[in-house]
Amino acid sequence: MEKYKKIIAVVAAAIIIIVPVLLFTLPKKDFSENENRVLQDIPEYSIENLVSGQLSNEIENYVNDHFPLRDNLVAMKTYVQAAMGYKEMNGVFIARGRLLQHIDKPDASEFIERVNKLCENLRKTSVNMNLMVVPTSTEVYRELLPAHAPDVVEEQPIIEEIYDQVHCGTIDVLGALKEAKNDGENLYYNLDHHWSFYGAYVGYTQFCEKHNVLPGTMEDFEPVCVSTNFKGSLYSKVLLETMPADEILAPNLKNKYLVVTYCDKGTKENTYYDKNFLKQKDKYSYFGSGNQALMTIENSSTTSEKEIVIVKDSFANCFIPFIIDDYKVIHIIDPRYYRPHISDYIKQHENVDEVLLLYNIDSFNTNDGIVKIK
């Protein structure tokens, strides 16, 4: 027994000594491709940071972000917990055949206020504005949740409350998504929080219904598989290798004569898709080259003269290809990165007929751009 105690003491001492050394000597990455986020830099000391507690938070984040073999330890922890019967890890439910995110109950009051402010600022224009709130896959596939899953948010009443309080048109997609899942198509990625080709298509059909327009069929969009190895945001939280990767389907935009302008970068492309991202972890950014502050899509192959402004989070990125043929120009604004007033932009573009706000419900918890909608 004494021998084992000595061995444990030696191992513990080695860990205490070696880990800090590795933490500060191993090469550091600025960006985690696996988690698709910037990592905490070495904290800067100041009296103000010390007193406010910000310094201790940054030190904790730095240690967590740069801990040696961090991804390997996360994966090992997942396997151990899964073997022990855990069904929720790091805010992710391990469901049958897919991962489901566990979100906090959203407080949409700020969002409602901002939307109504935008409505008020556009009141004297002829612009038609609609809001589409997209549920999480957890709400759509609620029946797949593990038994006794704790504190799972009921999203339907929250969406209904939002729709009751905004002063613009609304587009319900939750009911249509719940109906469509019975057709057997996968509406959301198994390992990522975004909706898939099929989910976005359902959103498109509801958009068309709101506009009294007959939607194109799924076959009309000639879905093309652009990747079979997509492991998205939910996978990154648990690193569960036993689950197969997702495939990414996209509408075929061949023979579309497009001019896609990335306003911040000052560059133009002839396609909405960015193949460079298919070689990276963040394959979802294939759609629109990720999140841009402002971009426009001009389509000279359509007979439509309409223009629309889309105010959005990343859920809109794979929705946009479905409506490209319906508009001469699509203006796309992400308020997380766009600084001027959105209403001013709309008023400056007199040919804009419509505005669509498209947000996933979890954005009300995490999207700091919402406060800039006006």
Image (cartoon, rainbow, N blue to C red):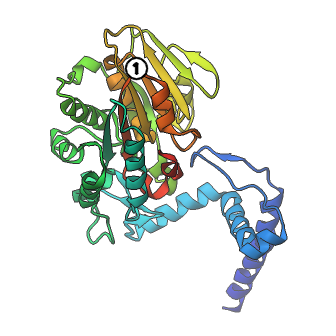
Report x, y in % for residue 178: 19, 47
Where's the N terminus, which quadrant? bottom right
Amino acid bearing label 1: Asn
How many residues crowd mark 1 within 10 Å: few (<14), some (14–19), many (20+)? Answer: some
Q: What is the tally of numbered marks visible in this picture?
A: 1
> For this view, does 127 lie left or right of residue 173?
right
Q: Is residue 206 visible?
A: yes
Kindly give the residue lying farthest to the front in the view shown: 124
Asked where in the image residue 324 lies, by quadrant, the reply is top left
Q: Name the residue that disc number 1 marks.
A: 351
- Is 155 above or below relative to 128? below
- Residue at 45% over, 64% down: 89
Considering depth in this image, is 348 or 55 the residue closer to the camera? 348
| Residue 53 place in picture, x, y as percent | 71, 73
Most foreground residue, 127 or 76 = 127
Q: Work out whether residue 287 can be spotted.
A: no
Circle 1 SS class: loop
Based on the displayed image, in which of its 4 quarters is residue 16 positioned? bottom right
Q: Is residue 183 above or below residue 360?
A: above
Residue pictured at 79% horizontal, 50% vertical: 27
